[in-house]
Amino acid sequence: MTDDLVLDVRDVKKSYEGLEVLKGIGFGLRRGETKVLVGPSGSGKSTLLRCINHLTPPDEGRIFLSGEEVLEKNIDAMRARIGFVFQDFNLFSHLTVLDNVRICQVKVKGVAADVATERAQQELERVGLGDKASAYPAELSGGQQQRVSIARALAMDPDVLLFDEPTSALDPELTGEVVRVMQKLASDGMTMVVVTHEMSFARQAADELIFMENGYIIEQGPPQQLFSSAANDRTRAFLNVIA
Ligand code: ADP
Ligand code: MG
């Protein structure tokens, strides 16, 4: 059944100027599931996430969001339902924290200004930044900026949240606060795909770990199982290095 899948990625392929980066990727995500995607640098993780909302249009394959196919003709509506958290936060520097979290609700979804403000404040509180609403991004630490970017994604009420190495631009002492927010989202039942090297997060929050290499999914399964007894030699070797 595809109906109970929030995200259904089927046989996605992508090449850049003849270099085949995704060679037929498929996976599904049920409501409330968290999957962590790992693999060596260059294995295609970012490309895969970007293909899901056509930031990078796939060459082949199909993607369904809550049963509806993601296509060029509906891409704006689909993007509004797919939250994306990037490595480098991507906040608007000229807007306050509150406006960063409000603005997409108003501009993309047409939410009334006062409703958007209230929702923004709620989401800031959820990530522990209720008192920073009137600050500007430059006044915040990297960890706080990344939490704002998570609040901004949540405020859109997305079907699914995609994270691309959300802590890798942060100083090590700031990763914990972002990881804790993601753990809370996972246990609150958010549906998420997280590319990260934070294996503590994978162990605690992931329903499944997906190991990707060279454009293929090599292995996927519960994190405990992959950490203790991965079937594939390359999965084992990779996890031994990062875990
Ligand atoms: P990962 O996120 O796993 O490190 P990427 O998806 O970023 O991997 O990259 C996979 C491969 O695709 C790499 O070889 C990378 O150099 C190449 N690549 C990524 N983006 C582009 C692009 N816009 N143009 C050409 N090659 C790209
Ligand atoms: Mg990447």
Image (cartoon, grey):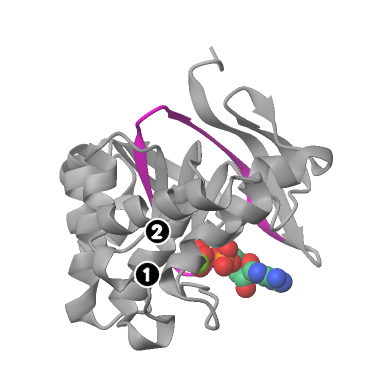
Region of the chain picked out in magenta, as a range: 20-43
Q: Residue 57: horizontal and vertical position, in percent?
A: 75, 52
Which residue does the image show at 38% across and 66% down from the upper left? 148
Q: Is residue 39 found inside the magenta-colored segment of the image? A: yes
The secondary element bearing badge 2 is classed as helix
Where, quadrant-wise, is the C terminus in this rendering? bottom left
Left or right? Give the position of 96 relative to 13: left
Q: Residue 89: horizontal and vertical position, in percent?
A: 46, 72
Q: Residue 77: horizontal and vertical position, in percent?
A: 70, 41
Q: Which residue occupies the foreground of this view, 198 or 84?
A: 84
Q: Using the image, determine if residue 215 lies above or below residue 158.
A: below
- Determine whether label 1 and label 2 are within 8 Å by CB: yes
Left or right? Give the position of 142 relative to 108: left
Residue 146: mark: 1
Q: Mark 2 points at which residue?
A: 150
Note whether residue 48 is visible: no
Q: Which residue occupies the foreground of this view, 185 or 101?
A: 101
Which residue does the image show at 50% across and 67% down from the upper left? 99
Q: Which amino acid does label 1 sit on?
A: Gln
Q: Which amino acid does label 2 sit on?
A: Ile
Q: Is residue 116 found inside the magenta-colored segment of the image? A: no
Q: Using the image, determine if residue 153 lies above or below residue 208.
A: below
Which residue does the image show at 18% across and 67% down from the upper left? 176
Q: Which residue occupies the foreground of this view, 208 or 128?
A: 128
Q: Farthest residue toward the front?
A: 114
- The image quadrant of residue 94 is bottom right
